[in-house]
Amino acid sequence: MLATLVVIALVVQDQTPLRAAPQDSAPRQATLWQGEWLEVRGERQGFIQVYDHRRERPGYVRAHQVRVHRLDETSVPRLQAVVEFLKDSPGSEALGIGYAAALLRAAPASQVGPELFDALGTMGDRLARRATSNKTNDAALAAHLDVAASYGVKLVSFEREGRTRVCYDGEAFRRVLALGGNPEARVRAALALTRPECIDPAVGPVELQSLNEWRSSVLDQVDTAKLPAYLANRLHLRRAEVYAALAYQLSRRGEVQRGAKASERSVEELARVLKAELAEEDKPAYATAAVRVGASRHALEPTQEKPGSGPVLELAQGQPGETCMRLVDARDPKAVLSERCTYGLVWPGSVRRSAQGSAVAVAVQMLESWTELWVFHQEGGTWVLDAVAPAATEPVLGYVELAGFSPDGSRVLVAREALVEGRVKSSFQVLKRETLVLEKSAESPEAIGSFQRWSSADWRGRTVAVR
């Protein structure tokens, strides 16, 4: 039906009444919302005579509540100007989508470029985020979602962290990347398409790896050389997060070399962030990305050579998906000092032993963004294993890593970063080796003299905790 329209009235006010006659006292046929199209059939007594194709009924609307446009090339400049204005007008997404649809209809194919799809995607994405943040039964918002859907703007929703998350499916942004677009439009498209909060929690491990490989390919389509520094920072942060996730997923499936390359890429992307150019709103994202990179960075580390004497940690396959760690005496491999199996990802390159051989530490990544430090240590002449967690919270985001041992082997140095109460907290700690009880803690390594003196050069050269 809409294909035959030549002149339309675009509703610009919410709760616009569609009257049965050109009178304010006439019965209300329907309630219209901004962004809806009506076919213009005439004008009477200050009312526009229209036909509503969605509801299949005629009626009248007040002239000041709509804007009339011919759907031909003469209207293109006016429509372009309105779309550009509404693109950055929060709360007017449905109206902007309606205008974008009118522009698509009026403009010849040669005039439809990435700028229009950038605007359409921006408004669709903002409408989805508005729906997610809404905590009340907002009739206008529900109507705007309905109007957007009538134009083919697809929004998907799923349960995440106890609430409903609404996300735009990104079709317009895909067109921006396909058609070219300026650097800023391309980075907006790439960041919107790879938004982590819009990953369905029900996606399985295999599908998640494929999704992250696709996300990395999308992000790599954007050249940072022509971007403002603050936008380049956002792209680097997103790449760091995606490649850190891939490092874990690839290594988990036994693709060690690809996992190491992904980890290396994540560290490089984090290092490219210009801290002086970080926008205020991007600082939490920087801290979060650093923790994700820190959780998977051990994929980069080469396996250490076994010492000539003292305890040696051997890794072997257990049940399917399980890794067994066996601490043995190098002089007598049959003498098992301690043993433990885990379904976590044990990083062979992270194994470190104190100079006296009284402690052996290894990083075990339990989840994509949660890495613990497992320490085999002597306690009263007996070897025991204790796991040091990033924080005493639900395992969501965090890592803990070995920073070194004291010269006499009686102390263990660790660095921790974790998401606690909504923000990333860092701590540098000195633990007693025998009990792993906390002795000293500070938010920076410089605040603890012994930590500064005893931390290893190997750790200082690789860690992302000091940045």
Image: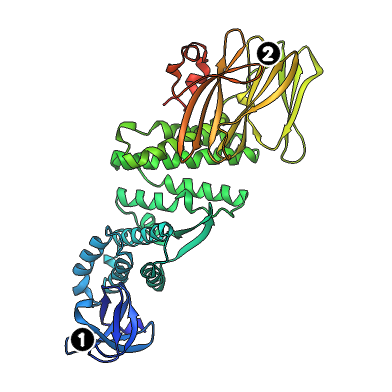
**Looking at numbered disc 1 in the image, what kind of residue is underneath it?**
Phe
Quadrant for the C terminus, please.
Answer: top left
Category of crowding for the residue at label 2, using alpha-carbon neighbours closer than 10 angstroms: few (below 14), some (14–19), many (at least 20):
many
From what the image shows, is residue 251 above or below residue 444? Answer: below
Q: Secondary structure at mark 1?
A: strand
Q: Which residue position is annotated with label 2? A: 358
Image quadrant in which you'd find residue 363: top right
Q: Which residue position is annotated with label 1? A: 47
Image quadrant in which you'd find residue 308: top right
> Is residue 207 found left or right of 170 in the rendered image?
right
Looking at the rendered structure, the number of numbered marks drawn on it comes to 2
> Is residue 86 found left or right of 329 in the rendered image?
left
User: Which residue appears at 42% of the width and 46% of the height?
Assistant: 219
Q: Mark 2 vs mark 1: which is more N-terminal?
A: 1
**Looking at numbered disc 2 in the image, what kind of residue is underneath it?**
Ser
Category of crowding for the residue at label 1, using alpha-carbon neighbours closer than 10 angstroms: few (below 14), some (14–19), many (at least 20):
many
Is residue 399 in sight in this rendering? yes
- Of all residues, the one furthest to the top in this rendering is 408
Residue 110, position as x, y percentages in the image:
28, 66
Determine the CA span between mark 2 and mark 1: 89 Å
Residue 402, position as x, y percentages in the image:
57, 22
Is residue 261 in sight in this rendering? no
User: Which residue appears at 26% of the width and 92% of the height?
Assistant: 21
Quadrant for the N terminus, please.
Answer: bottom left
From what the image shows, is residue 266 above or below residue 71? Answer: above
Between 267 and 456, the residue placed more toward the observer is 456
